[in-house]
Image (cartoon, helix red, strand yellow):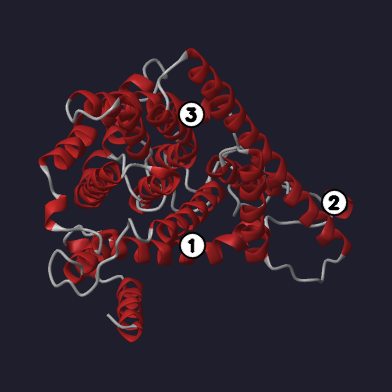
Amino acid sequence: MTIAVWFVLIGSLLIMMGLRSSILQRFNLTQPMVYLAVGVVLGPTVFGAFHFNPLKEAHLLEVLAEVAVLVSLFIAGMKMPLPFRWREWRAPVRLAFLSMTISVALTAAFAHYVLALPLGAAILLGGILAPTDPVLATEVQVRHVGDTDPLRFTLTSEAGMNDGSAFPFIMLGLALMNAPASAELLGAWVLKDVLWSTLSALVVGLVLGQLLARIVQKQRLLDSEGPLLDDFLGLGLIGVVYGVCLALQAWGFLAVFVAAISLRQTELKLAGMDAPGNNAHAVPESSAHTAMRTPQYSPQVSEGSLLFKEPLERLSELVLVVLLGGMLFLDSWSFRAVGLALFLFLVVRPVSVFLGLLGSGTPLRLQMLVGWFGVRGIGSIYYLMFAIVFGLPEEVDVEFIHITLVVVVLSIIIHGLTVRPIILKWWP
């Protein structure tokens, strides 16, 4: 496929998605399903017009997936309708940390005892497949900044956090593949990869998000006529937060999500719009005295950033899913890969959600829906490429690629086909 053909293909897909054909809704098709079908048809599975080799292009694919996840996490954080209060965030936090741990453990047990993988490789595979995806789960994600739907809020906030909470298990799996388990290794892992990397990421995201909001407020008070490039500010915050976290060896995905929430909620607070519900489109109560005393300010950085980053997120989704279809071969579909995928969807996800939310007061219907909609996607692709670039035996690389691709593809198809019927029937 020449460059000209690629331009025509991507442009045609963008136009088709932009028209939002009723055919997609009629057949309960999602956008990732269309992109995947195009990639599979053009890839080695059918016509063989192109083949994207994830082993040879691991560095490139790692960067593409990394950028896609960062942008998606930032958008998800911007759309969070509520500041962090334990009552509202209790279920997502338990899902992102407790359910994540259970999910990794169950997946690793299957990989170790059924697939006969070594313990380190089994834990690594559990870490790759455990996090839910903020990129491909658009049908069940928070739709706008004022969306307080409990299901969408829970799934979005969980996906925002568990892309960071999965990283300690990635590092544990890699460590155990290179050294036997010992108290010293586990102690160092808990102190560095669990405690330090997680807590420092939370602090970096919280502080830098608030700092940018206050800098922008001061700038607007000093020069109310001077325009600000909100999209640049948002991208700059992603870059600074992620770069600082890399330097500190903190989990940058988690920090970027927290920074977006911190920026948004600080802007709302400075604008006097931090009442319960945080409806950014509501007009805050004011008086003539208040208006004279407090200069007008609005959360423009977070809102302006969304106008630019949402199309960027959709474009990255299109490119990566088409490439995903171009990685698949017919022999990728082994009983080992399909069996693990079904075990992940039908056992691991529901059980980990039920145990993670046990005693939390979360309604049973919400638990059941959250237990089904654990979409796997670009986050798993990134972790896979991270592990390959880090250095794995070639036979492990090949098996992990086949398993991860099958899990993501089946997730796109199964969750994509069921999302609308289930939501319409079971969720008000």
Sequence order check: which comes first, mark 1 or mark 3?
Answer: 3
Q: Amino acid at mark 3?
A: Val
Q: In this rendering, which labeled residue sits more in front, label 2 or label 1? A: 1
The residue tagged 1 is: 310
Res 37 → quadrant: bottom left
Q: Is the Cβ of the residue at disc 2 closer than 8 Å to that at disc 1?
A: no
Q: Position of residue 130 (x, y in %)?
A: 35, 35
Q: Is residue 318 left or right of residue 1?
A: right
Q: Which mark is residue 93?
A: 3
Q: Amino acid at mark 1?
A: Glu
Sequence order check: which comes first, mark 2 or mark 1?
Answer: 2
Residue occupying the point 18% across, 63% down: 26
Sequence order check: which comes first, mark 2 or mark 3?
Answer: 3
Q: Residues within 10 Å of mark 1 (few under 14, many from 20)?
A: some
Residue occupying the point 25% across, 44% down: 395
The residue tagged 2 is: 294
Res 42 → quadrant: bottom left
Q: Amino acid at mark 2?
A: Thr
Residue closest to the eye, 76 or 153: 76
The answer to whether residue 160 is above or below residue 99 is below
The answer to whether residue 98 is above or below residue 47 is above
State how far apart marks 1 and 3 are (Cα): 25 Å
Residue occupying the point 17% across, 37% down: 342
User: Residue 364, can we see it?
Assistant: no
Q: Is residue 292 left or right of residue 298?
A: right
State how far apart marks 2 and 1 are (Cα): 32 Å
